[in-house]
Image (tube, helix red, strand yellow):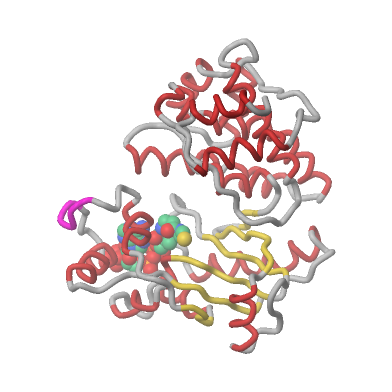
Amino acid sequence: MAGMGTDRLIERLGGGDDVRSWVERLDALGEPSRPVVLPAGSDLVETLLRLSVAHEDIDTLLALRPTPDGDPDAWWLLGRSVENVVRRMGVVADWERIPPLPESFGPLRRWFWVYVFVAALPHVRAYHAERRIPDDISWATLADLGRQMAVHRKRHGESGFDDPVWVTLHFTGAIYQLGRLQFELVRLGDTTGQRMLDGGAPVGPDAPALSVHIPGYSGPFSAEACDASFAQAVPFFAQHFPEDRYEVGICHSWLLDPQLAEYLPEASNIVRFQRRFQPINELPADNAGTLRFLFGIDPDLPLDAYPQRTTLERAVIGHIRAGRHWRGGVGWLRL
Ligand SMILES: CC(C)(COP(=O)(O)OP(=O)(O)OC[C@H]1O[C@@H](n2cnc3c(N)ncnc32)[C@H](O)[C@@H]1OP(=O)(O)O)[C@@H](O)C(=O)NCCC(=O)NCCS
């Protein structure tokens, strides 16, 4: 589809630099080395359920399942996107920029990426098997797809999925759910690495590290559950990724904003989680980021539109009303 073909597709996808760069990257991959295989019928149902896709979305996903004879643009994007995921398998790389699909893409817009990950599933399962990742960990990790669809439903008030950048990590073997927490394989950047060295860390820029994430829709993250996850992570990565030594964890999150400790008790899970990490960075003001993660809905609503049921909800809104800003935080710890 080089040249005129990609120009037309870029236009159909709404143009813009992000779209152009995404389509050109896909085009540059060349002809996929393997055909797209999408399960159909009851096989598709079974696959979606294993990925914890909600029952209410299954009929739509069966009905909209792309085929080579349907929309050729969608089929091309699907083939190249699957190829892209497969080529990134086992590679620790920067998060990609993937633009949202426009309304004009039609009903597939909200579901396209689910098919990409379903088609990539056998490849990541083979990779997990090669690394001897236990089956329960493999499936618990990949089921984040369904969880992110729940995030979408809450955020947009309708079903779908729009976070391919995040879930690409799961389907390229770059992140694992170990109990309550997820651990992503990363390499430390220059600034973070240097600040960590200055703060007494045993490693610096470009060293392998585990970036810690906290999945939602899983209840509180008690200190005991987090202890168990960290205790599991050390032998897990030593056994399944022995080529690198993971000595440090890092976390970049709205939960690490030190200002939260002004409002929450010392015994709260969030403050106890913060105390594990040595802070390394003052981040720019980002009220929207904190509102989005805490409430899971549009961060541009008037302040009195947000629920005020918990200490944290009241603290977050009160802080903004007082003219202050949330920033999140970055911290590191020894594993
Ligand atoms: C991270 C998370 C598990 C923390 O919940 P927790 O273990 O209950 O946290 P704490 O014990 O510190 O809670 C302290 C207070 O904040 C409230 N709180 C915590 N998370 C809340 C949330 N997401 N929404 C509303 N209130 C919340 C608690 O109810 C408690 O208030 P209360 O005493 O009035 O009931 C929870 O916020 C969550 O699931 N978040 C979504 C995932 C996420 O944000 N991940 C990080 C991405 S960077």
Q: Please give left or right for residue 154 compared with residue 17 in the image.
A: left
Percent x, y for residue 28?
71, 37
Residue that extends furthest to the left in the rendered view of this protein: 304
Q: Which residue is more in the foreground, 245 or 189?
A: 189
Q: Which residues are magenta?
A: 301-305
From where the camera sits, is residue 139 visible?
A: yes
Taking the magenta stretch, the answer to whether it contains residue 283 is no
Q: Which residue is more in the foreground, 225 or 165?
A: 165
From where the camera sits, is residue 144 visible?
A: no
Q: How many tags in the picture? A: 0
Secondary structure character of the magenta stretch overall: helix
Q: Is residue 192 above or below residue 139?
A: below
Q: Which residue is more in the foreground, 20 or 44?
A: 20
Question: Residue at image x 35%, y 50%?
Answer: 296
Percent x, y for residue 114?
56, 32
Q: Is residue 233 above or below residue 121?
A: below
Q: Quadrant of residue 265?
A: bottom left
> Quarter holding the N terminus?
top right
On the rendering, which quadrant does ligand 1 occupy? bottom left
Question: Residue at image x 45%, y 76%?
Answer: 272
Q: Please give left or right for residue 97 compared with residue 14 in the image.
A: right
